Amino acid sequence: MSEARKQLAEQLAEAVFQALSEDLSRQARALLVVSGGSTPVPFFEALAAKALPWERVDITLADERWVDEQSSDSNAKLVREHLLIDKAVDANFIPLTCEATTPEEGVDEVAKRAESLAWPASVVILGMGGDGHTASLFPDSQELGLALATDEPLVAVRTPSQPQPRITFSADRLHQAHRHILHITGDDKRAVLANALNGDDVRQLPIRAFLSCPLAIYWAP
């Protein structure tokens, strides 16, 4: 990993630590919403080393593939292996899957579980794909319109470009956070973001749904 990306992970961990500390100083619990993929791994590990009252912190995911939690494609597995470690081992993690066969069948059960969390979230950390998707708001998803418009917390998603069905928090629920952070690396992602900033068609580049609210951007080459 480059020195710049390591530094980025440390700076982001410090910012999230400060945000959670601030909110925990005035409320009983705080919620952190994270994203999966390879980009956040060094950030997860840096954050897990921070001394917080982790037993008062709820953690969930912005979205998840509807796979078994032991699958290498599971974002929950990633969180358990890289964030719920070290000092953060006592955090309350709520995954976005259940025993149901499909996300369409399981979405209500997962939503019920998610409603017990400390909303509004203290921090939502978003990633972004090369196609401009964030969470599981994909440009080619037939559920994109619903996920952008509904006030339901979670949406089951099918996307032609993705092998597995998914579940995602809706744009509305993700918007209801005190702070929003976009964590990306590489020149290709910077170019996608520049493109997103130069237009307003959310369906073409769904990350645009979050460019209308204050968004802290953490980027390194």
Image (cartoon, rainbow, N blue to C red):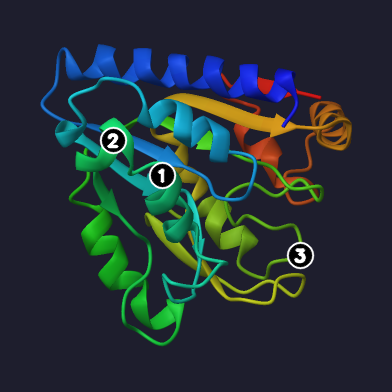
Q: Residue 24's spot in the image, x, y percent? A: 19, 19
Q: Is residue 108 above or below residue 87?
A: below
In the drawing, what numbered circle is on residue 88?
2
Residue appearing at x 34%, y 21% in the figure = 50
Bin the neighbour count of mark 1 within 10 Å (Cα to Cα): few under 14, some 14-19, many 20 and up: many
Question: Relative to residue 52, is residue 74 depicted above or below?
Answer: below
- Decide which of tag 1 and tag 3 comes sooner along the chain: 3
Q: Which residue is mark 3?
A: 140
Disc 1 on helix, strand or loop? helix
Tell me which amino acid carries mark 2.
Answer: Ala
Cα distance between the residues tagged 1 and 3: 21 Å
N-term-proximal mark, 2 vs 1: 2
Can you say which quadrant of the picture contains the N terminus? top right
Say which residue appears at 41% left-offset and 87% top-offset.
101
Going by the numbered disc 1, the residue's amino acid type is Arg
> Which one is earlier in the sequence, the residue at label 2 or at label 3?
2
Q: Quadrant of residue 40?
A: top right
Task: Please identify, in this view, whether the residue under mark 2 or under mark 1 is nearer the observer.
Answer: 2
| Residue 218 in which image quadrant | top right
Circles 2 and 3: CB atoms closer than 8 Å: no
**Figure check: 168 above or below 18:** below
Please, what secondary structure does the residue beneath circle 3 have?
Answer: loop
Q: Position of residue 14 (x, y in %)?
A: 45, 15
Taking the image as drawn, is residue 189 in sight?
yes
Residue 31 makes an appearance in the image: no
Q: Which residue is mark 1?
A: 173
Q: Dot 2, how many residues are within 10 Å of its Cα: few (below 14), some (14-19), or many (20+)? A: many
Amino acid under disc 3: Asp
Q: Give how far across and how far down residue 185 sits, in percent.
A: 74, 32
